[in-house]
Image: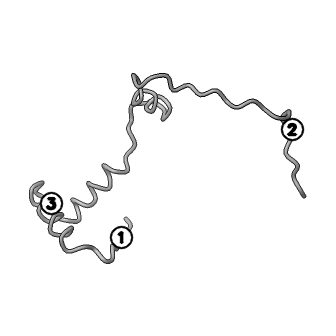
Amino acid sequence: MATLTVRDFDDELKAELRVRAAEHGRSMEAEVRDILRRALTRPSSGEGMATRIRRRFAGTGDLSIEPPPRAEPARAAELEE
């Protein structure tokens, strides 16, 4: 297990954390672990990001964008060795 030190932690924020931890019946450390776990756990819906974005903006109108016309044909990148 890793140890994390948070410096310059605001006193008001610490007090709010203490209250929230007490409401959930756990220590402040356990509360912080739970907050971080929830914030960093990705949804397990099996959907990709594009699907989630499309669903979020559904019904907001036509979001299709036409790419600009090319001024010159595509060419391979020139790499130096």
Query: From what the image shows, is residue 7 above or below residue 63?
Result: below
The residue at 33%/77% (across/down) is 7
Identify which amino acid the numbered label 2 is placed on.
Arg
Identify which amino acid the numbered label 1 is placed on.
Leu
Residue 5 rendering spot, x and y as whole percentages: 34, 74
Residue 36 rendering spot, x and y as whole percentages: 32, 56
Residue 42 rendering spot, x and y as whole percentages: 40, 43
Residue with the mark numbered 1: 4
- As helix, strand or loop, the secondary structure at mark 2 comes to loop
The residue at 20%/74% (across/down) is 11
Residue 4 rendering spot, x and y as whole percentages: 36, 70
Nearer to me, 3 or 65:
65
Quadrant of res 69: top right
Residue with the mark numbered 2: 75
Looking at the image, tell me whether mark 2 or mark 1 is earlier in sequence order: 1
Which quadrant of the rendered structure holds the N terminus?
bottom left
- As helix, strand or loop, the secondary structure at mark 3 comes to helix
Distance of label 3 from label 1 (alpha carbons): 18 Å
